[in-house]
Image (cartoon, rainbow, N blue to C red):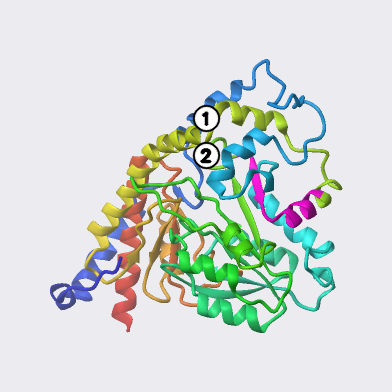
Amino acid sequence: MTTELSPDTQAQAPAGLLERARKDYDELAGRGLSLDLTRGKPAPEQLDLSEELLSLPGGRFTAADGTDVRNYGGLQGLPELREIFAGVLQVPAAQLLALGNSSLELMHDCLVHALLGRLPGAESRWVDQERIAFLCPVPGYDRHFGLCERFGIDMIPVPMTDQGPDMDAVERLVAGNPAVKGIWCVPKYSNPDGVVYGDETVARLAAMPTAAPDFRIFWDNAYAAHHLTDEPAELADLLAACAEAGNEDRAFVFGSTSKITAAGAGVAFFGSSPANVKWLLAANQKRSIGPDKINQLRHVMFLKDAEGVRAHMERQRALLQPKFEAVARILDAELGGTGLATWTAPRGGYFVTLQVPDGCAKEVVRRAADAGIVLTPAGATHPYGDDPRDAVIRIAPSYPGLAELEEAIKGLTTCVRLVGLERRAAS
């Protein structure tokens, strides 16, 4: 949403409003708060919804096909669990792997295997090439950027639109530079803007010419089932679009149950073309004798089927939706009409993006910290921690209790008003 400074407010600015903002901040800082809005973790109440997992699988140790889940093997993961999540992640079950507990770990491994091995369609190992780069839609997910930094992969920022990354920029960059090997995408309720990629964006990603024959879309569908409204967003099927466009090997699809069941003890998934699945399985054989099939079986028994996933996520939504509504209500009440901030109204996912005037985000975060409200560092939503506008702040409403959250957001708006009005007075 966008807000503008009203004529009446402009007439008062900056002296009277700035004095009031300073008094409000002094009062906030004197309250001795200790509040944390840094990461999008499930709240304890959300984790409690999956408490039954801890008592499973009980006395059962065999999968549907008779596999003893206590033993070695089964690199692809349990077929019945892959069937449950095939529709959620838009990947045929035969092309979906159920692996460890972290999709981030799978993204890490895919990068390592591409660097040290040879991807289908690749002319050589990535590590043997002079330069490797990834496109990074911004604002985006800091852990994606951290992986690139870890392996010395250059990051090229690409602006986000309300339909996904700016595809004119993406197409130009991938067509002209063989060093551009991939793009990070959180296509549904993206982190942190809540954007859902439009059908045209998905089609263009699938069909665009690339200078690199081994170009990959790292499709991190982390919020595939994480709706906040009565009308879940629909996402076009990237894997099918790539196959139809003759680029069958282009997409790596990732997902997990981390924000569905137990965040530290879920199941992660990898989906792709048959050639890419074969490639990853061959690489994984050198590092693991098989995933935790006991944990996979307990997830099968707990969730049962795709409808079970939907029902469980409705229970999650009942806990999350009031928090997002509280954030929107307070931001509108405290900052609406001031011209000092804009913010997103996501239909799903885990984050709200707050944009403050250019040059103000770091100072807002610092003032909030001094008042006992810890936020994700300004710049974390951009490669190398550098937001060139210094304007984006990511809000994670999920973990605090509702009363704590309301207090934290109210305090944050106090900091936004103070910093914004100080900047306005100095200009």
Q: Which residue is mark 1?
A: 50
Pick the residue in front: 408 or 116. Answer: 116
User: Furthest residue to the left?
Assistant: 8
Taking 134 as reference, is 327 above or below it? above
Q: Amino acid at mark 1?
A: Ser
> Residue at image x 69%, y 34%?
78
Res. 99 mark: none
Q: Which residue is mark 2?
A: 260
Give the magenta part as a residue range. 264-281
Percent position of residue 427, x then y: 32, 84
Percent position of residue 288, x then y: 82, 42
In 3D space, how far apart are the residues under numbered discs 1 and 2 (Cα atoms)? 8 Å
Pick the residue in front: 133 or 4. Answer: 133
User: Image quarter for residue 401?
Assistant: top left
User: Image quarter for residue 395?
Assistant: bottom left
Direction from residue 159 to residue 152 in the image, left or right = right
CB-based contact (under 8 Å), mark 1 and mark 2? yes
- Residue 59 in sight here: yes
Could you tell which of marks 1 and 2 lies nearer the N-terminus? 1
Q: Is residue 290 magenta?
A: no
Percent position of residue 379, x then y: 52, 68
